[in-house]
Image (tube, rainbow, N blue to C red):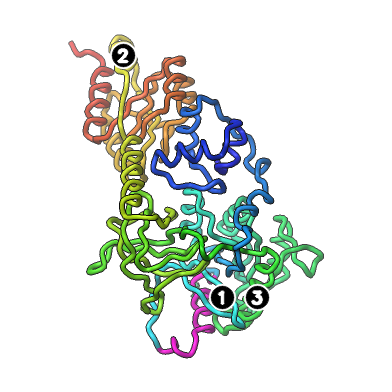
Amino acid sequence: EDIRVYEFAEKINRPISDVIKVLFSLGLMMTKNDFLGSDEIEILSEEFGVEVTIVDPKDAFNYEEDMAETIDENATKRPPVITIMGHVDHGKTSLLDAIRKAKVTEDEAGGITQHIGAYTIEQHGEAITFIDTPGHAAFSQMRQRGTDVTDIIVIVVAADDGVKPQTDEVIKLAKESEAPVIVALNKMDKESANPDMVKGQMAERGLNPVDWGGDIEFIPVSAKTGMGIDDLLENILLTAEVLELKANENAMAKAAVVESSLEKGRGAVATVIVQNGTLKVGDYVVCGSAYGRIKALIDENKKQIKSLKPSHTAVVVGLNEVPSSGEIMMAMKSDKEAKEYAQKRHEYDRNKELSHSTKSTLEDMTSMIAEGNLKSLKVVLKTDVHGSLEAIKSSLNELRNEEVKINIISSGVGGITENDVELVANSENCVLLGFNVRPTGSVKALAKQKNVDIRTYSIIYQLLDDMTGMLTGMMAPKF
Ligand code: GDP
């Protein structure tokens, strides 16, 4: 669940610096306000020898302390970063395009802009940055990695269609992130537009319109005609004003990766939004297990720029490998330092993949199965990435034959958790399979105590071989 570094330190009664030190030794560059992933929490819990159960992350959220870091005396105002979310076809892409088109400056007009994953516009001399990867997948992914760059969320609802399932999803995400919300009532040019219906639906979900006495702005817009775009931008700036967003331009740069890819001629590139400091051409940077020296910063107008200030965005050229979106990029003092952190991170990632297992209980089960008359082997499956999850699931299903079958009772992407162990412990004839994920010490201890067999693999055919063996053991002896 979502817990910040300082919250974790508070919970275990240790100085924040101790926690950060451990994270750094794992190659994870995190500061006290960053969110910890479940893997990090497990590893830290092991490292500090504590049992951590997280009740409600919101209770532990400390707004003042959160702000304390950014409002240092050298911090100055920075522009807001906006994410537009909403149900499919309600007009996210159209709105992002309309905003961009309405606000291209003189010298950019006619120039070719390219989609880099984010862009910055100016409204009456004030900058606003939009994350331009429609859908909330990118937002969720970044949050999962603990990268909360979004200051304000714009929820788009088509005024002729109203609240839809994905609208509910983004409302939930918005509430979790605690970023202020502005609702854009889109498609107001349509005759069937019914803003009051939408307001009613949103109010039912706790988003009360200002004109109904609530605190959420509902701005009627049309991405098609451009109506209301100015109004929306003004409201974004007003909301940002209240947030008093600040950053220190002179600090060592910290930025978040929004998009990344491998490009012909340029190599690994990443679009970043600067969170603090100023990112400059020539800076040594580390970004997860990638590192390098910034060769070029290219904005969405394909213009080369020298430096990038807080909340601004550009494509970074010069990394040795492609970082994941949501990864944090940090400027380092030297090439050596950047390389060291990248290597540590490599080791950390590799360690996560190392597999150990105990064979005994599996063998016990095989012989038990052979003696008895069991016809189904239950499996709980965890993998590191979605691709391998799907591949293994379909292969396991192919292993079924007329006599015995595999029954996948639970599967998912992520580390092996105590919940997984409990699930297996409470199911008869069940094994826990991990692919490129391994249990931590506490999970292992629980598994031992509950007599749960955890089998971890890093090669798919070995996993399938073992399961084939199990199934063979389960077949009734033929005479
Ligand atoms: P997304 O899936 O949320 O990104 O939605 P799109 O931006 O792709 O828009 C979906 C459809 O609605 C497209 O056919 C757009 O042309 C149309 N659309 C978007 N905004 C408006 C609007 O303000 N008025 C009208 N009439 N159509 C719109």
Q: Main secondary structure of the magenta part?
A: helix
Coordinates of residue 207 in the picture (x, y in percent): 71, 59
Question: From the viewer's perspective, is residue 193 above or below residue 170?
Answer: below
**Pointer 1 residue:** 127
The mark that comes first in sequence, 3 or 1, is 1
Is the Cβ of the residue at disc 3 closer than 8 Å to that at disc 1? no
Q: CA distance from mark 2 to mark 1?
A: 63 Å
**Pointer 3 residue:** 193
Q: Secondary structure at mark 2?
A: helix
- Three-letter code for the amino acid on which mark 1 is drawn: Ala
Is the Cβ of the residue at disc 3 closer than 8 Å to that at disc 2? no
Residue 472's image quarter?
top left
Question: From the viewer's perspective, is residue 90 above or below residue 49?
Answer: below
Numbered mark located on residue 391 in the image: none
Q: Quadrant of the C terminus?
A: top left
Question: From the viewer's perspective, is residue 454 above or below residue 156?
Answer: above
Numbered mark located on residue 360 in the image: 2
Q: Is residue 186 visible?
A: yes
Question: What residue appears at the point 48 percent right and 33 percent down from the top-left corner?
Answer: 44
Please give the range of residues in magenta. Answer: 91-110
Coordinates of residue 300 in the picture (x, y in percent): 41, 75
Residue 361 drawn in magenta: no
Q: CA distance from mark 3 to mark 1?
A: 31 Å
Q: Is residue 134 visible?
A: no
